[in-house]
Image (spheres, rainbow, N blue to C red):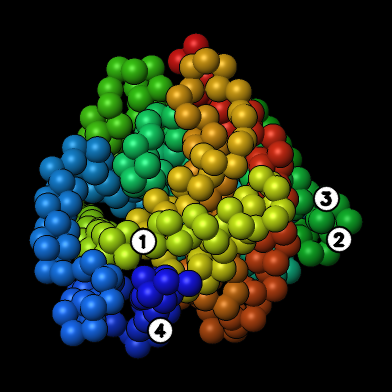
Amino acid sequence: MEVNDYFVIAMFLTFIGLLFTGFPVAWVLGGVSVLFTAIATISDTYFDTMIGLDYITLGMAVNRIYKYMDNWVLVALPMFIFMGLMLDRSGIAEKMMKSMQELFGKVHGGLAVTVTLIGIILAASTGIIGASVVLLGLLSLPAMMQQGYKKSLALGTIASSGTLGILIPPSIMLVIMADQLGLSVGDLFMGAVGPGILLGILYISFILIYCFLKPEAAPIDPNRRPIEWWMVLDVFKTILPPALLILAVLGSIFAGITTPTEASGVGALGATILAAVNRKLSFKVVIEVMKGCYNTTAYIFAIFFGATSFALVLRCLGGDEFIERAITAIPLGPYGVMAVILGCVFLLGFFLDWIEITLIVLPLIAPVVSTLGFNINGYGVVSNPEMVWFVILIAVTLQTSFLTPPVGFALFYLKGVCPPEVELVDIYKGVVPFIILQLTGLIIIAFWPQLVVWLPAMIYG
């Protein structure tokens, strides 16, 4: 190995180590890049190591940061965040929970199925995992515990359904991934629909089969009324507003009427109108939503700045060539190499947020995928179908990492709204079957890439 390779390894290990100090990630990323630029400059000056880093490197980082701030695609981030936060305040989820609970009340596991369906609808409306998990926990956990649901089933259903927001469009993660790799946001949004629906079907199938085999895990409320037509109509009426909003946002993108940035503005306005119609809109709500939007956006862009400096220094050290050599040297064939890449991303998800992985790791490993020889049929319509498929695989893997003990973010979001008698170990037990289901879905997508590329090809074709 060359001197630069040792610097690359040391830079990664320093970053991982400093994460456990509790410093903000953005500061750690920027600080490590400045630190290693200084070390490399001193090493080149006094020891003739020829590493090739100096203060000019950090000057290049300033130009790259300016390009991010001048990027119209990223304007969609605060708008989608505003849309999600406003929808959480609109009261729509509460209405859907009440009406669906009436409809599925006479089915073992019906309440868990209701939570999953609402999780899918929230995912397509908000795209914010923390908000979805907390909202589902507040709405459904007391009812499930009162009805006598097994703790692990209730907690696992809530946590897994809430994480769908990171995958099902409009997903802010997919917007950032598209920007990093120069892909079409519309392709990724459409490509994520099939895998998102697949995971939803796997969740619901598991719940119904499990509750059929173990009905005591999900008792039926004896006070529930038999199903009547008005219940179906009530569910339709409560689902219609968010469905129209989803259609306005995603439909306008898919039809080519608007860009993702323009559609995000439509979504933000639509969510505000829904809150007003439900009489949940007030000056206080608007201020709180705007503050939440500001905090989340500032957090993401701060990491953008730090990750830009980190990635630039890493590349100047030859980090991309080092990673490419390491990965292509694995003698396992294309699918074996892909499994190793996804496994590494899965493990990194234990320690890093999806933003750091998207900004630092994804651009380094993406070029390697192009050399593996996957030949995916894009039907002559989808440009770079291999990369679209790969990005969706990464997205599903990152979604799985949100549920994985001991540091899955969704687990702690849920623990924050649980009653005192619910322990963290109960949540750990509950998510295990759903982690297995997500890994099953990942394998299906890996061996059936048309699940990803068929919809964008059909829409554009």
Q: Residues within 10 Å of mark 2 (few under 14, many from 20)?
A: few
> Disc 4 designates what residue?
17
Where disc 3 sits, the SS reads helix
Q: Earlier in the sequence, mark 4 or mark 1?
A: 4
Quarter of the image where one finds residue 455: top right
What's the CA distance linking mark 1 and mark 3? Answer: 51 Å
The residue depicted at 39 percent of the width and 51 percent of the height is 363
Q: What amino acid is at disc 1?
A: Gly
Q: Tell me which label, 2 or 1, sits earlier in the chain.
A: 2
Label 2 and label 1: CA atoms lie apart by: 55 Å
Q: Is residue 84 above or below residue 19?
A: above
Residue 346 showing in the rendered view: no
Q: Are marks 2 and 3 in contact (CB under 8 Å)?
A: no
Say whether marks 1 and 3 touch (CB < 8 Å): no
Looking at the image, the residue that sits furthest to the bottom is 21
Name the kind of residue labelled 2 in the image: Lys
3D distance between C-alphas at marks 2 and 3 = 8 Å
Callout 4: SS: helix
| Label 3 to label 4: alpha-carbon separation | 43 Å
Residue 264 as seen in the image, left or right of residue 95: left
Q: Amino acid at mark 3?
A: Ile
Q: Which mark is residue 318?
A: 1
Residue type pointed to by label 4:
Gly
Q: Position of residue 11 (x, y in %)?
A: 36, 75
Specify which label sits upstream in the sequence, 2 or 3. 3
